[in-house]
Amino acid sequence: MSYSALVHLVCSRCHKTATPEVIQQTCPDCDAPYLCEYDLERARAAWEQHPLNERPPTLWRYHELLPLQSEENRVSLYEPLTGVWPLRGYAKKVGLKHLYVKDEGILPTGSFKARGASVGLSRARELGVRAFAMPTNGNAGAAWAAYAARAKIPALIILPSDAPRTPRKEMLAYGADVFVVDGTIGDAGRLTQALCKAYGVYDVSTLREPYRLEGKKTMGLEIAEQFPDGLPDAIVYPTGGGAGVIGIHRALLQLQAMGRIQGPLPKMVIVQAQGCAPLVRAFEQGKRVSESIEHPVTSAFGMRVPKALGDFMILEAVRETGGTAIGVSERQIADARRQLAEEDGFFVCPEGAAAFAGVETLRASGWLKQKDRVLVVNTGSGLKYTDDAPFDVPHASHIGDFARFIKRVTNDRA
Ligand SMILES: Cc1ncc(COP(=O)(O)O)c(C=O)c1O
Ligand SMILES: [Zn+2]
């Protein structure tokens, strides 16, 4: 039995197939992303013969549904399965009985981007890629720089000049070539494409090569294993480029085709910041594709994507599953971030906070019911965004300055 059950690539728009045996970027006919197609019957038989729960607890346990042909090409920093657990304090506050989080902050480099980097770079190395370039809002660049250091492959990473500072320090530490541009990730992307075209460098921008998405897909494969008694009613995801949502949806479709999950799929819910909500707008207007936002503004940088290349697939995942799309304000994002920390001891990234704020809004509107089982993906650790965290620390010089704490202590005793 081979390591991967990958059969071919198929264009997500014109459906023409292509060989995965050579380096591919987007479809040459329509510039749409390629998707990986697998022999699902072969994967099903392999999983029956070697059950998943007897395999090592990392995303590589799903290797038959990943594109890597040979295990020895794997580039890994050890990617644990990320836990799913209940958030009781916040659930009570928003009026839900069953609210769970899948916390991606525990992955190497602190975000779900490690999944795409591990799988994408492994496959790139297998195909003989000698250098790559990418635009990023921060976390993807940090992840790819780390895995590139491990694989000894030169990386050029371009980010908007106002992107968060922690990830760029990480990228420099890993030895990547890092640059900032004025503008958005879209502008960084155009510069990346120009360089890649001029020098034949591999472009690993979101959905411009077929394999990053496959790494993201492992979130969906894990979720299916983590809810053995029935999938959640809704999966809520903070969405920018959309690979996370497309990946989870594809995972669930593949598992359904393999007979591993039954019943309707969870409703896919995408959350964006009101200052950059092209997908929410397209969803509300009933459109198949989104229109680019000219001046996107949000502190949740991972979602500051003016137009996603795979917008039509994101909107399809939302509509096909009966999900929805919702925009949240910067105020709601900051409040959710503080409340989760206070209520549940859980420090999320602004993108994760946006997803929770989306849950609160959808519960208040009645779209989510009290009994619904809701899973939110916290896409990264709060520790990656401390520069602008909404917490001030006052000075102390006398015990009288500790009034709030003293009041809490004495109230407890009373
Ligand atoms: C922490 C975080 N959350 C969410 C996103 C958006 O994810 P996607 O591009 O898969 O929609 C990003 C992307 O940069 C991110 O860094
Ligand atoms: Zn095509």
Image (cartoon, rainbow, N blue to C red):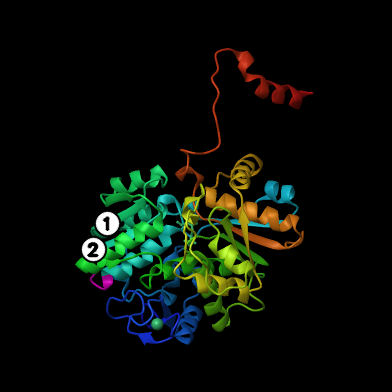
Decide if residue 137 is on the left or right side of residue 146: right
Quadrant of residue 249 within the rendered picture: bottom right
Q: Main secondary structure of the magenta part?
A: loop
Query: Which one is nearer the viewer's eye here, 185 or 317?
Result: 185
Q: Depth check: 300 or 353 in front?
A: 300
- Amino acid beneath label 1: Leu
- Disc 2: which residue: 131
Say which residue appears at 63% left-offset and 60% top-offset.
326
Instruction: Where is residue 319? Give x, y as percent.
Output: 62, 74
Is mark 2 in CB contact (under 8 Å) with mark 1?
yes
Q: Is residue 27 magenta?
A: no
Q: Position of residue 160 (x, y in %)?
A: 38, 50
- Seen in the image, is 361 located left or right of residue 37? right
Number of callouts: 2
Q: Residue furthest front?
A: 294
Nearer the camera: disc 2 or disc 1: 1
Circle on res. 116 = none
The percent position of residue 396, horizontal first and vertical second, equals 55, 17
Residues under labels 2 and 1: Cα distance?
8 Å
What residue appears at the point 73 percent right and 61 percent down from the top-left corner?
368
Task: Check disc 2: other Cα within 10 Å, few if <14, some if 14-19, many if 20+.
Answer: some
Region rendered in magenta = 126-130
Q: Nearer the viewer, residue 90 or 239?
A: 239
Image x and y of residue 26, in percent: 36, 75
Q: What residue is shown with label 1?
A: 156
Quadrant showing the N terminus: bottom left
Residue 251 appears anywhere in the view: no
